[in-house]
């Protein structure tokens, strides 16, 4: 009994200082990589790392909201491809169109896709993994339909659109600036609004949330709409950054997003996760993706190492949840 209590106390300490542990781990990884390759901590490489992680971080915000409700969205890679293709076709045929309009267009396209997924999950009670998997195939197919299987290449896009990824706002790369703005808004929304607190409540105890009258269906639908909107915006940014739109854009990218959330301590079962932890998870995943090629790690080993880190994070999350559940049961028994 005493050993169990000590073990539970240690795990609760891990949960309490998770963010500190992530910071320490990130610092250690950076030191090891810098020792192996002096180019890692140069200003140019750090700038590239942050730019590459910007799209991932934007998507992770939406995925965190979905996961907090106990859901998952596997369609975001397809939504990115579809929204990016729609924006690319628009700018190809109308070179003078404003980039802001393309952002809004992509966001709207993504939001509509999120509405459908959210409706399937919230209204018809279809399992999130099944609903989003079905939508992933539907939307990926629509991408090929609207593009007729063709690519939109760099020479078909105006410089005003392609330069978004390399331009800056107040000295900050535009993609990074957009990600920062989204994180600030998300932090306020999830921590300081009634709707944000309800998202946590729905995920931590769905039955209790329904009993006390929280609009569970509306909240679940809303998070999928927001996820879709962010995926649509990210799709436009992706196409602008890489100056290419194709049917298989961001294929499998949803797994990177989910991995970043898990690394940041967002519970797959819902109801638990912090914005700071999410940000650190994105940074850690971005560092791994950037650093492993720099130290000449085989692409096969890169996936294995990333997978090992993700599994370690999942195991830690599961152990912490079980310990907390047992502690809660003991308190109720007393």
Image (spheres, rainbow, N blue to C red):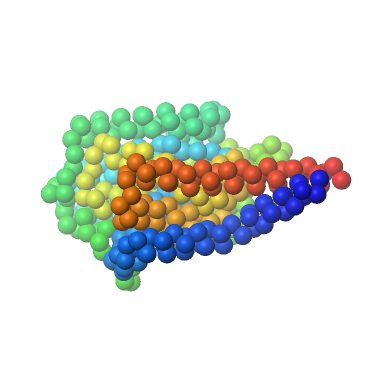
Callout count: 0
Which residue of the protein is positioned furthest toward the bottom in this rendering? Answer: 170
- Quadrant showing the N terminus: top right
Determine whether 147 is above or below 309 in the image.
above
Residue at the (57%, 62%) spot, across then down: 20
Residue 255: name its quadrant: top left
Q: Nearer the viewer, residue 56 or 89?
A: 56
Residue 16: name its quadrant: bottom right
Residue at the (36%, 29%) spot, across then down: 138
* In this rendering, position of residue 199 left or right of residue 112: right
Can I make out residue 268 in this image?
Answer: yes
Image spot of residue 271 (x, y percent): 62, 46
* In this rendering, position of residue 28 left or right of residue 154: right
- Quadrant showing the C terminus: top right
Residue 267: name its quadrant: top right
Image spot of residue 157 (x, y percent): 17, 50
Determine whether 288 is above or below 125 in the image.
below
Which residue of the protein is positioned furthest toward the right in this rendering? Answer: 334
Q: Which of 213 and 237 is in front in this view?
A: 237
Q: Nearer the viewer, residue 235 or 14?
A: 14
Which residue of the protein is positioned furthest toward the front in this rendering? Answer: 36
Image spot of residue 292 (x, y percent): 35, 52
Residue at the (26%, 53%) spot, across then down: 241
Can I make out residue 169 in this image?
Answer: no
């Amino acid at each position: 009994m005493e050993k169990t209590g000590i073990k539970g106390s240690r795990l609760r300490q891990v949960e309490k200082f998770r963010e500190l542990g992530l910071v320490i781990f990130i610092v250690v990884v950076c030191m090891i990589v810098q020792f192996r390759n002096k180019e890692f901590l140069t200003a140019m490489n750090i700038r590239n790392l942050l730019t590459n992680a910007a799209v991932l971080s934007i998507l992770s915000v939406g995925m965190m909201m979905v996961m907090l409700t106990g859901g998952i969205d596997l369609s975001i890679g397809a939504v990115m491809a579809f929204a990016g293709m729609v924006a690319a076709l628009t700018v190809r045929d109308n070179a003078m169109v404003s980039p802001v309009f393309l952002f809004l267009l992509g966001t709207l396209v993504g939001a509509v896709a999120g509405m459908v997924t959210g409706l399937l999950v919230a209204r018809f009670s279809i399992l999130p993994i099944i609903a989003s998997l079905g939508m992933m195939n539907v939307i990926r197919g629509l991408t090929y339909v609207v593009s007729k299987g063709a690519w939109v290449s760099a020479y078909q896009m105006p410089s005003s659109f392609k330069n978004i990824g390399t331009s800056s706002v107040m000295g900050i790369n535009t993609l990074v600036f957009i990600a920062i703005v989204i994180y600030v808004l998300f932090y306020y929304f999830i921590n300081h609004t009634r709707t944000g607190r309800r998202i946590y409540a729905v995920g931590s105890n769905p039955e209790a949330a329904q009993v006390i009258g929280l609009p569970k269906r509306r909240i679940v639908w809303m998070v999928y709409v927001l996820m879709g909107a962010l995926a649509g915006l990210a799709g436009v940014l992706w196409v602008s950054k890489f100056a290419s739109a194709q049917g298989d854009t961001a294929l499998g990218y949803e797994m990177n997003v989910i991995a970043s959330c898990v690394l940041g301590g967002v519970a797959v079962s819902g109801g638990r996760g912090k914005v700071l932890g999410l940000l650190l998870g994105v940074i850690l995943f971005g560092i791994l993706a950037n650093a492993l090629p720099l130290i000449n790690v085989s692409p096969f080993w890169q996936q294995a190492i990333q997978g090992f880190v993700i599994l370690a994070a999942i195991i830690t999350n599961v152990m912490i949840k079980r310990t907390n559940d047992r502690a809660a049961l003991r308190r109720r028994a007393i």
